[in-house]
Amino acid sequence: MSTLRQYLDSREREIASQMASLKTELAEIRVAKAAIEGSAPTHLKGTRSRDLGQRDMILKALDQRSAGGRSDEIVQWVKEDFGVDIALSSASSQLSRMKSQDTSVVLDQATKIWRSANQASNGNATAPKETASPTDEAVSAEEGATSSDMQPDPRRD
């Protein structure tokens, strides 16, 4: 059994390495195509992903999506836009910290949808109607509610 486990561990590392190489190559192809077309990919305008921290990547991803999204969607957008994997727990911590410290993001408590404060102030979202404790925010950001606690996502109708 340990031989199988060792093989699977080794294969997993190989595939992860190949995926990272392919993501880098894909990003380079997108940059080259954008250069040929005379534009820059949206997520690369003025910055490179390696120059951004998780907080900045999260904010840029939210700024580009007026409807906002759940924590897991934001993690996926960062991966798509910047080629960077962020753990859901890290993204949730960043979102909660931004909400409480500098109000750069807004959480709609009813839908658990995070939005950029820029999008919310542009009339694309409303501020949350209730205030939750940091513990409640962390739980909701982690999507830890049971299926009976979940509200339908109004964007999916």
Image (tube, rainbow, N blue to C red):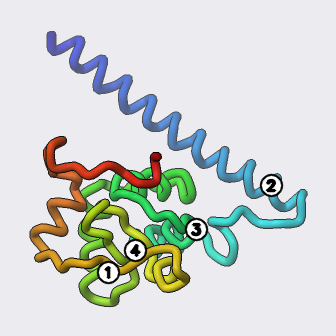
Q: Residue at x 18, y 79 (%)?
A: 131
Residue 39 lies in quadrant: bottom right
Q: Which residue is mark 4?
A: 55
User: Does residue 26 sit above or below 98 in this rendering?
Assistant: above
Q: Which one is in front in this view, the residue at disc 1 or the one at disc 4?
A: 1
Calculate the distance from the C-alpha at mark 1 to the C-alpha at mark 2. Answer: 34 Å
State which tag comes first along the sequence, 1 or 4.
4
Calculate the distance from the C-alpha at mark 3 to the C-alpha at mark 4. Answer: 14 Å
Q: Give the amino acid at mark 2.
A: Ala
Residue 21: where, in percent of width, then height? 57, 42
Residue at disc 1, secondary structure: helix
Q: Which residue is mark 1?
A: 98
Pick whichever, 2 or 144, lies toward us: 144
Residue at disc 4, secondary structure: helix
State which tag comes first along the sequence, 1 or 2.
2
Task: Assess whether mark 4 and mark 1 are in contact (beta carbons under 8 angstroms).
Answer: yes
Q: Which residue is mark 2?
A: 32
